[in-house]
C-alpha cells in the first residue's frame, strides 16, 4: 500500500483453461473466444475484413502462455462463463501486480493453422 492506504498495483485474475480433452470444434470455439477472429469477404467493391474481438483484445488483457491469460476480474468471470458453457475446464486465480512489474508478452499472432505463433 502507498502512503494513502491505496494498493500499489492492479487486482487481476490469472485464467488458465484446458482444451486438450476437447474435440476440434470446441477448441476452435475456445480460440475464437480467447483470441478473436478476423474474416475476409470478397465483394464486388473489393475485399472486406471483419474483426470479432476476443478476450485478449480487451483493455489490460495479457497473454501469459499457452492456455493462460491475465484479465481484469470482470472479464475473467465473463470468460469463465463462456468456457464453462462449452464444458471446458477453467481455473481463476486472483493476483495483484505492481504497476512497475507488468512484463507479460504481447498478444501472440495466430498462424494460418489457427495456433498462436511466437
Image (spheres, helix red, strand yellow):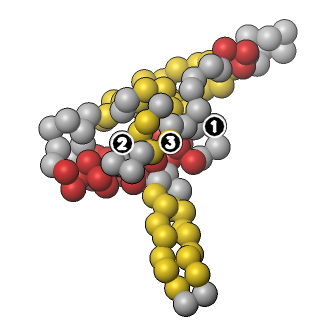
Rendering coords of residue 84 (x, y %)? 28, 46
Along the viewing direction, whichever of 24 and 61 lies nearer the viewer: 24
User: Marks 1 and 2, Cα distance to the nearest angstrom?
Assistant: 22 Å
User: Marks 1 and 3, Cα distance to the nearest angstrom?
Assistant: 17 Å
Q: Is residue 24 shown left or right of residue 32?
A: left
Kindly identify which residue carries mark 2.
115
Rendering coords of residue 108 (x, y %)? 50, 37
Q: How many marks?
A: 3
Tag of residue 30: none
Q: Is residue 105 shown left or right of residue 89?
A: right
Looking at marks 3 and 2 on the same chain, the residue that comes earlier in the sequence is marked by: 3
Along the viewing direction, whichever of 4 and 28 lies nearer the viewer: 28
Looking at marks 1 and 2 on the same chain, the residue that comes earlier in the sequence is marked by: 1
Tag of residue 109: 3
Q: If the image is split into quadrants, where does the N terminus sit?
A: top right
Residue at the location (49% across, 61% down)?
38
Residue at the location (50% across, 47% down)?
55
Rendering coords of residue 86 (x, y %)? 25, 52
Tag of residue 60: 1
- Tell me, yes or no, if residue 73 can be seen here: no
Residue at the location (33% across, 48% down)?
113
Q: Is residue 40 shown left or right of residue 112?
A: right
Q: Residues within 10 Å of mark 2 (few under 14, many from 20)?
A: some
Q: Is residue 1 above or below residue 21?
A: above
User: Marks 3 and 2, Cα distance to the nearest angstrom?
Assistant: 9 Å
Label 2's element?
Answer: loop
Amino acid at each position: 500500500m502507498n502512503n494513502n492506504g491505496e494498493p500499489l498495483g492492479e487486482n487481476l485474475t490469472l485464467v488458465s483453461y484446458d482444451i486438450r480433452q476437447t474435440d476440434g470444434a470446441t477448441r476452435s470455439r475456445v480460440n475464437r473466444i480467447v483470441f478473436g477472429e478476423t474474416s475476409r469477404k470478397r465483394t464486388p467493391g473489393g475485399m472486406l475484413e471483419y474483426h470479432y474481438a476476443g478476450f485478449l483484445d480487451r483493455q489490460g488483457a495479457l497473454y501469459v502462455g499457452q492456455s493462460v491469460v491475465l484479465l481484469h476480474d470482470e472479464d475473467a468471470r465473463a470468460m469463465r462463463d463462456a468456457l464453462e458453457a462449452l464444458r471446458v475446464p477453467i481455473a481463476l486465480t486472483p493476483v495483484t501486480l505492481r504497476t512497475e512489474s507488468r512484463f507479460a508478452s504481447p498478444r501472440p499472432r495466430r498462424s494460418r493453422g489457427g495456433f498462436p505463433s511466437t
